Amino acid sequence: MTSTETRVVLPGTPASAGAAVGPVVRVPEPLGEPPAGPSVPEDRRETEAARIAPAGAAVSTRMMDTAGTPGLAKEVSDVLYATAMMAEDPALLESAAELVRDHGTPAPRAVHESAARFVAALQAAGGYLAERAGDVADIRDRIVAELLGVPAPGVPALDRPSVLVARDLAPADTATLDPTKALALVTVEGGPTSHTAILARSLGVPAVVGCPGAETLAEGVLVRVDGVAGEVVEVPAGTAVGADTAAAGPSVVEGPVTTRDGRRIAIVANIADAKDARRAAEVGAEGVGLLRTELTFLSAATEPTEADQRAGYAATMAPLRGTPVTVRTLDAGADKPVPFLAVAPEVNPALGVRGQRLFDEAAGDAAERSSTIGSADRAGVLDRQLAAVVGGAADAGVELKVMAPMISTADEAARFVARARAAGAEQVGVMIEVPAAVLNAPELLAEVDFVSVGTNDLTQYVFAADRQSGPLAGFNDPWQPAVLRLLDQLCRAAAITGTPVGVCGEAAADPALAVVLVGLGVTSLSAAASALPAVAARVASVDVATAQRAARAAVSSRDVASARAAVRDLLG
């Protein structure tokens, strides 16, 4: 591209901060539908059907090998192991084999049709189950490729630093990327809270998602990906390839963090395992604002013992000795299946019996019907977790805070606080993820020591828009004025009760939006460790009056674009 040519700028949604320049490497589109015919002769059907199980086993073995890669984060390994198990799911493989035997359907087509039923059922279920539909589709394509003898779909091997451009990326593909080769990610679909965006932030790789037009970028063309502005720009040949260090910003948190006029803002990390905790400590995080505990439970056939849980929590928290660590209790339910809880399917799992609702004995018949396990036994699961968390925190030498997910009313909050205090927890709070919790704030805040806003769930519930839906990504932008107005209402109520308000959703990873949150009255910001240095530096660069002006500008804006623009103009 010469200086006289038109500069191609593709706007998208900022997903992971930083910027990088590199040649485009296009990720192949998923395999199309395999041929429906010709029909397999009856005398060859058994042989054709017998090809399916070995193909699934081969795919599973390769994914298991990847899951066992040394140094891979536990949460990533768990995703890969769970996906590998899908490749040998007897229900899927036998259903496909029956299509071959009964109808003469060729094996690749039979796998495609059988998987399509599973995908449709998961998508109809919504919530966490709908997120798994993409994993099943990915496994389907890998087994079909194995049967056809063609390369499997997924990210191609990178022989040089490049910018990956895809319609979308499977979580397993994103999680195993080498940041020294994958300089940046661009996807046509997805939103700022998609798995691709969250994992890109965890890897520290700039990313732009929801970028229509990215599919037109030619293989090898040089582009600059700006994960802050949300732009992909073609640049002239000869432009230096690599990370834009000027855009990368600081690499550590220079704490304790205060605004220019001295207001203290806690900059803390979202973690799931000890590797995350070590990374948080390395960048100077002042503690943990969200320790997710459900990952261990999601793959457990039986309830982990209290002793095992305690040891696991202690190991996870140990790298952050002496700092405050906020633990979220098990966020389980119909939208996040936990095998040993035997949770029954629901028509709309995202709005069903999940989180604290499953363990609240006062929730009534709905919770009782949601599981084959009685209410007392389910309550015991929570009590044992709370005891393990308290013990693990003591072993690790951290300042423990605990909070419950999916709280809507003051009564729910009060019951959880009583349970947590009985287990020995001294600082007890709740998540604000449901609009009703904000509307009930005056009463709810009086029951707790702190609250933490999960902006990802709060946004999708405000707009009734699944945050994993590509077509609805625009609704699930944390800059939405409607969501900021709810946070404004919450912070005003918290100022009256003196209750600290934290944000642990992906909104806290955006430096400019972090200033808005401080202006609204938020007292702690929690995000992936890689995002914290830039957030801390931005917060420290403004005084409270400036942050409040930014908050008023964003809250009074008409839409996402005008909110971003107004704050950008104000902050410079």
Image (spheres, rainbow, N blue to C red):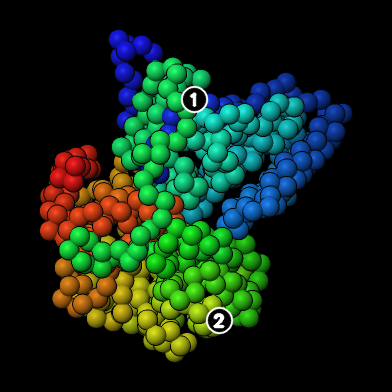
Query: Which residue shows up at 31% across the image and 46% down it?
Result: 477
For the residues labelled 2 and 1, say whether their Cβ atoms are less than 8 Å apart. Answer: no
In the visual, does 387 lie left or right of 464?
right
The residue closer to the viewer here, 160 or 253, is: 253
Residue 428 placement (x, y as % from top left): 37, 79
The residue closer to the viewer here, 531 or 371, is: 531
In the visual, does 126 lie left or right of 232?
right
Residue 170 placement (x, y as % from top left): 54, 41
The residue closer to the viewer here, 541 or 206, is: 541
The residue wearing badge 1 is 24
Label 2, residues with CA under 10 Å away: few <14, some 14-19, many ≥20? some
| Number of callouts | 2
- Nearest to N terminus: mark 2 or mark 1: 1
Task: Give the residue at the far right of this rendering.
Answer: 43
Q: Tag 2: residue type?
A: Asp
Query: Which residue shows up at 58% across the image and 67% down it?
Result: 297
Q: Secondary structure at mark 2?
A: helix
Residue 123, numbered label: none
Query: Compared with residue 498, is residue 142 higher up or lower down, i.e. above or below?
Result: above
Q: Tag 1: residue type?
A: Val
Q: Secondary structure at mark 1?
A: strand
The quarter of the rendered structure image containing the C terminus is: top left
The residue wearing badge 2 is 395
In the visual, does 191 lie left or right of 278?
left
The residue closer to the viewer here, 550 or 331, is: 550
Residue 97 placement (x, y as % from top left): 75, 39
**Residue 528 in sight from this viewpoint:** no
Residue 364 placement (x, y as % from top left): 41, 78
The quarter of the rendered structure image containing the N terminus is: top left
